[in-house]
């Protein structure tokens, strides 16, 4: 598994997930009872956090998202299905406390991750996926500058037993400079030279 770094920007810090983050995760999931939202990324219940952390550490490059202005953890996200040979990865397993949703935190988080994946790891493509019925997530991914590739029908079985259609989005290496400018503009209303 790749040894991955802490990432930092003006307003947030992405810290590699550790068991010590359990309290922060508990505060996140309890802000809005996130585990009850069946159509988003499966969110652990407060009593499932140790297992969630253990699985995350074994299967993906998981981060805790810390907000400098709020002085607390506001979410978690991951890099997964990383294939060095084919220079590709996914960003996902993302959820935010209810009070941090629909803020610039997601844009800044994705900007940090994409910059790391395209500029440091030199990937050719980064994909993001979401539930077909999660319209907020689909709009948020499209606003980043990702393009919809397609819909995988009957792709996954959700924890409640329902079957998920998965919408796949991607950003390719050649698009990254434009996407980077777009994200910078959205966050700072200015372009990178």
Image (tube, helix red, strand yellow):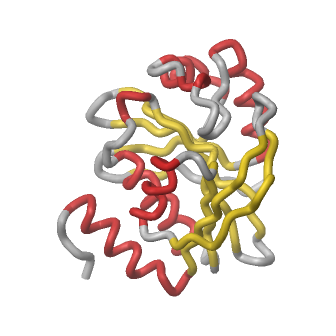
* Whether residue 139 is visible: yes
The answer to whether 191 is drawn above or below residue 62 in the figure is below
Residue displayed at 71% across by 53% down: 165
Q: Is residue 132 above or below residue 93?
A: below
- Residue 84 location, quadrant: bottom right
Viewer-side residue, 187 vs 133: 133
Q: Is residue 72 above or below residue 55?
A: above
Please state if 65 lies on the left or on the right of 52 as rendered. left
Q: Quadrant of residue 53?
A: top right
Q: Residue furthest top?
A: 47
Expressed as whole percent of the image width and height from the top left, the position of residue 154 reads 80, 53
- Residue at left offset 42%, top offset 61%: 111
Residue 21 appears in the picture as rendered: no
How many numbered marks have been drawn onto this rendered protein structure? 0
Left or right: 128, with 10 as reference point: right
Q: Residue furthest left?
A: 189
For image coordinates 63% across by 40% down, the residue present is 41
Q: Nearer the viewer, residue 171 or 59?
A: 171
Q: At 60% from the left edge and 77% from the top edge, which residue is drawn?
A: 122
Q: Position of residue 129 (x, y in %)?
A: 63, 57
Residue 67 lies left or right of residue 133; in this view the side is left
Name the quadrant of the N terminus: bottom right
- x%, y% of residue 2? 73, 57
Give the position of the C terminus as an image quadrant.
bottom left
Extreme-bottom residue of the structure = 174
Q: Is residue 7 above or below residue 178?
A: above
């Amino acid at each position: 598994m790749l040894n991955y770094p802490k990432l930092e920007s003006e307003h947030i810090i992405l810290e590699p997930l550790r068991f010590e983050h359990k309290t922060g995760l508990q505060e996140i999931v309890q802000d809005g009872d996130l585990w009850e939202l069946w159509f988003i990324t499966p969110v652990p219940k407060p009593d499932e956090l140790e297992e969630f952390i253990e699985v995350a550490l074994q299967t993906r490059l998981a981060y805790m998202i810390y907000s400098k202005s709020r002085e607390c953890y506001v979410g978690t996200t991951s890099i997964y299905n990383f294939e060095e040979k084919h220079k590709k990865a996914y960003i996902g397993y993302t959820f935010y406390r209810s009070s941090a949703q629909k803020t610039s935190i997601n844009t800044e988080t994705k900007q940090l991750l994409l910059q790391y994946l395209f500029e440091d790891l030199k990937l050719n493509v980064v994909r993001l996926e979401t539930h077909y019925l999660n319209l907020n997530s689909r709009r948020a991914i499209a606003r980043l500058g990702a393009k919809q590739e397609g819909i995988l029908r009957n792709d996954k079985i959700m924890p409640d037993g329902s079957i998920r259609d998965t919408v796949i989005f991607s950003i390719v290496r050649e698009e990254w400079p434009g996407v980077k400018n777009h994200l910078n503009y959205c966050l700072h209303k200015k372009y990178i030279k």
